[in-house]
Structures are given as C-alpha cells and as structure tokens.
Image (spheres, grey):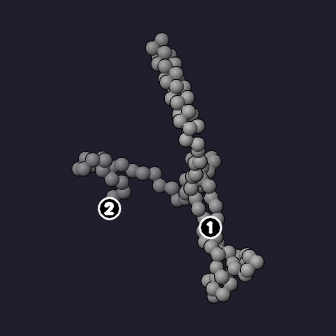
Amino acid sequence: MPIGYNRAPNDDMKHYRRFFNDELENNKAIMPDCPFINEGIYRMVEKKAGLFGMGGSNDASGNAFVYGGFFKGAVQVFNVARKEKRSAVMEKLLHEIKELIKGVYEA
C-alpha cells in the first residue's frame, strides 16, 4: 500500500505524516523541555516468590521491590474556585488583546 492516505474518498490527494524514530520529548528541536512526569513503577514480591521475585532492594520483612517500568504522563491539580477566577481573567485579557490587534490592522 502507498504511504499516506486520501484526505477525502477518491480525491487522490495523499496526506503524509512526518515519521520520528524516537519519542518527541527526546527530540530537543521539537520539545526543549519534557512536558511529562517520568516515575519508576515498582512491585513488591515476597522473598519466597522464586526466580521472578529476586532483585531490587529488600524491606525489613524480606520482601523485594522489583522495577516494572515507568509511568509517563502529565498531571494537573487545581482548585475549582481559583481556576474559574483565573479563566475569567484570562478571557478578559484575551478580549483586550484581540481588540488591540484589531485596532492595529484597522489603522
């Protein structure tokens, strides 16, 4: 099959996507600062768990913590009242900016 896809059925105008070999946050030209939180995920296994329970550091009871991968995501924590107040201020300022731009282009 050819690379790309038609924008509308049977229009023969292919749309192509740019391909990256790595995650976009690892490409500093695209994302200078990573927007994601990367945290290791560990699971606790009992010492007697056998071959797959070995590794990691042990706690006082002899259980082992084994690395299982990592969590990658973006987390937002906010206060509802403060967010609503901030949204109202942002909307007012955005309106003022649009009016200023409109005034510049009409002059």
Q: Residue 74 appears at what percent x and percent y?
A: 57, 52
Looking at the image, which residue is at 39% across and 50% down?
A: 16
Extreme-top residue of the structure: 107
Pick the front one: 64 or 27: 64
Vertical side of 107 occupied by 3: above or below? below
3 up-or-down from 90: above or below:
below
Say if mark 2 contacts mark 1, CB within 8 Å: no
Crowding at label 2, few (<14), some or many (≥20) Cα neighbours within 10 Å?
Answer: few
Labels 2 and 1: the sequence-earlier one? 2
Determine crowd level at label 1: few under 14, some 14-19, many 20+ residues with C-alpha closer than 10 A. few
In the picture as drawn, the residue positioned furthest to the front comes out as 81
Residue 46: image x %, image y %? 66, 82
Of 70 and 45, the residue lying toward us = 45
Tell me which amino acid carries mark 2.
Met
Name above or below for residue 72 compared with residue 56: above
Kindly identify the residue that appears in the image at 47 percent across and 55 percent down. 19
Residue drawn at x 46%, y 51% as measured from the top left: 18
The percent position of residue 8, horizontal first and vertical second, equals: 27, 47
The kind of secondary structure element at disc 2 is loop
- Residue 41: mark: 1
User: Residue 89 occupies which quadrant of the picture?
Assistant: top right
**Pair 2/1: label in front:** 1
Can you identify the residue that label 2 sits on?
Answer: 1
* Mark 1 residue type: Ile
Q: Is residue 51 left or right of residue 103?
A: right
Q: Secondary structure at mark 1?
A: strand
Q: Is residue 74 at least partly visible in the picture? A: yes
Q: Nearer the viewer, residue 10 or 103?
A: 103
Q: Who's the residue at 33% across and 49% down the image? A: 14
Distance between the Cα atoms at labels 2 and 1? 40 Å
